[in-house]
Amino acid sequence: MFEIVEQVWGCGYMYGVKLVDEHDAANLAPFARKYGLLFRRPAENNVIPVVPPLVSTRQDIDDIATRLRTILKEYILTS
């Protein structure tokens, strides 16, 4: 869907969105804050960890996915 996303993987409620090497996930933090999301510190610089609260509903997860798509679109437009 996005050319900067190399791979998405996960298990249960923990997911990682791996960006292509020339992009640093830390650069998305200002966009994430703008849309009400906080990213955990990634183990790798180009991975966005997605770890919602365990009490999240399906609607919450859909909302997080929508916000993440918006964040990626805005990041692409400004970089």
Image (cartoon, rainbow, N blue to C red):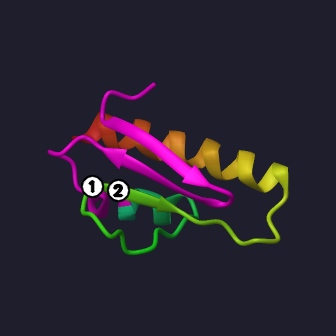
The x, y position of residue 30, in whole percent, is 37, 63
Q: Give the residue drawn at x 18%, y 45%.
A: 21
Magenta stretch encompasses residue 33: no
Q: CA distance from mark 2 to mark 1?
A: 4 Å
The x, y position of residue 17, in whole percent, is 43, 49
* Residue bearing mark 1: 46
SS assignment at label 2:
strand
Q: Mark 1, residues whose alpha carbon is within 10 Å: few (<14), some, or many (≥20)? A: many
The x, y position of residue 22, in whole percent, is 14, 45
- Tell me whether circle 2 and circle 1 mark residues in contact (CB < 8 Å): yes
The x, y position of residue 9, in whole percent, is 50, 46
Residue in front for this viewpoint, 27 or 7: 7
* Residue bearing mark 2: 47
Magenta stretch encompasses residue 13: yes
Which segment is the magenta one? 1-28
* Type of the residue with mark 2: Val
* Type of the residue with mark 1: Asn
Position above or below: 30 against 10? below
Q: State the quadrant of the C terminus.
A: top left
